[in-house]
Amino acid sequence: MERLTEFGWRLLPFVVVIALWYGVRWSGLVDQGLLPPPHLVFADIWQRSVEGTFLIDIWMSVRRVLLGLLFGMLLAVPVGFLIGWDKRIRRFVDPLINFFRALPPIALIPLAIVYLGIGEVAKVAILFYAAFFSGVIVMYEGMSQTNPLFIRVSRTLGATDWEVFSKIIVPLTLPHVLTATRVALGVAWATLVASELVAAQNGIGAVIQNASAFFNLTTIYAGIITIGFFALMMDTILRWASRQFLDWQEREAQ
Amino acid sequence: MNGESAVRMQNETGTDHEVKVRFQNVSKHYGDVEVVHDVSFDIREGDFVSLVGPSGCGKTTMMNMLAGFVKPNSGEVLLEGKPVEGPGPDRGVMFQEYGVFPWLTVEKNIRFGLDLAIKRHIPKDERRQITEKYMNLMRLSDFRNAWPKNLSGGMRQRLALARAYAANPHFLLMDEPFGALDAQTRSDMHELLHQILQAERKTALLITHSVDEAIYLSSRVIVISARPSRIVESIDIPFGFPRDKSLLDSREFIDLRIHLREQVMKQYAEQQALR
């Protein structure tokens, strides 16, 4: 019962937004042709899903995000760890990372198209770039705040180098990995859609782009809502994982 | 381990007071600032030595040299005759900031030292028993599955003590472990420390600001000067063990306290002048 109430509260803002949507449409403030009603948008999502091609588009998009995120984080974790740990490496790498992080990944799309074409490799490469630079910064800022006290304590109990790493540093790193993944995920979704809008035969971004060419507003809205839905689902899963693994953390970290 | 130490005890009858730790003309500086200047003293088997002095005077540096975190610039810190090479499980350390691992439950914190490779030769059952024992002694059994974030300061420090004891160190090094606790909790910790030391004697070094704490817990109190640390005075505390709170009101205790406070206050004044 409590859970149901909780779920209801989470759903409520969306219900309100949809109600407002109807309200705007009926108020006549906006030309009705420019604002499809929500039920038609959801019907469009349903119909495209039943037809099947939309599911492939969703799958392609989700796969690109997951692959980019996976490769990006696989590199961001050790690199963020290293520069968080070693001041000399940090001094060298910090300016570079700040430069590349400040550079929006979308700006690299034309370059990726020239070098890597418009296939999967180009898209995953851009997402990798986006995920890596947003993730690495969170990783190393977290790591550089690591309290050396815990390492000292473990040494006085007789921990070997490997045990210091596996029993102290790894658990201290995990929260930062999860936070970094969440940040990287958000950036990856934003970048994905941009790259699919520019050049792609499939994916949700491509669906939106095609619909736009035919002035099909219902499908544009359907695509946008689908993207929002999947981005939210992935973030929710990560948040849930954080709560499971990081129950020990003080609340302010959550 | 038990058999081995029993044999050693027998061999050492008569030399019960052998020197375990020797600070030999130890000096340490950080950059231009000298924090410890030519300090020499011994800690004998079973001693409880307190270093009292103004904050920022270098007491912690002295403990860190014995713990193995810091190396002296000149002189030597000898542990059973050999220079300290680095930290090790023979020297358990309690820190003011507790140092309990927030990602482990109370029980797993206590077990931490026992589950390291170095203690793997102890059978699992025995490791569990040791954990239980110190969890009970430190009155933490009801919180075995609690996260440290849910513990009070006193409980965290009890946890740190249980964890240190579970690893069965020969020495107990304490760096102002009760500094952050309120007066009542602090007093409870003193009793608990007396109890556990009574049950299992360790050779101990305590860093503290509190003259009362130093006298009440120690067999010897060493007053440390303003920076750089030198030894101002070393006093053997004439009270036997076990002790209880009634000692705090005795004439001898009060006289000793007055004398030591005076000594320490002088150093505080000098330390203030340094700033």
Image: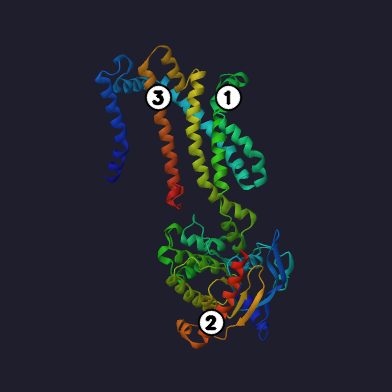
Q: Is residue A171 above or below residue B46?
A: above
Q: What is the x, y in percent for residue B72?
A: 71, 65
Q: What is the x, y in percent for residue A71?
A: 57, 34
Do dots 2 and 3 share one subunit? Answer: no
Name the foreground residue: B165 vs A216. Answer: A216
Local packing at callout 1 (Cα closer than 10 Å; few below 14, some 14-19, many 20+) is some
Residue A108: image tag: 1
Q: Is residue A67 above or below residue A177?
A: above
The number of numbered discs placed on residues in the rendered structure image is: 3
| SS category of the residue bearing label 2 | helix
Which residue bears the numbered disc 2? Answer: B258
Q: CA distance from mark 1 to mark 2?
A: 75 Å
Q: CA distance from mark 3 to mark 1?
A: 23 Å
Which residue bears the numbered disc 3? Answer: A224
Q: Residue B136, can we see it?
A: yes
**In the image, what residue occupies the spot 57% across and 79% down?**
B260
Chain letter of the residue beneath label 2 in the structure image: B
The amino acid at mark 2 is Ile
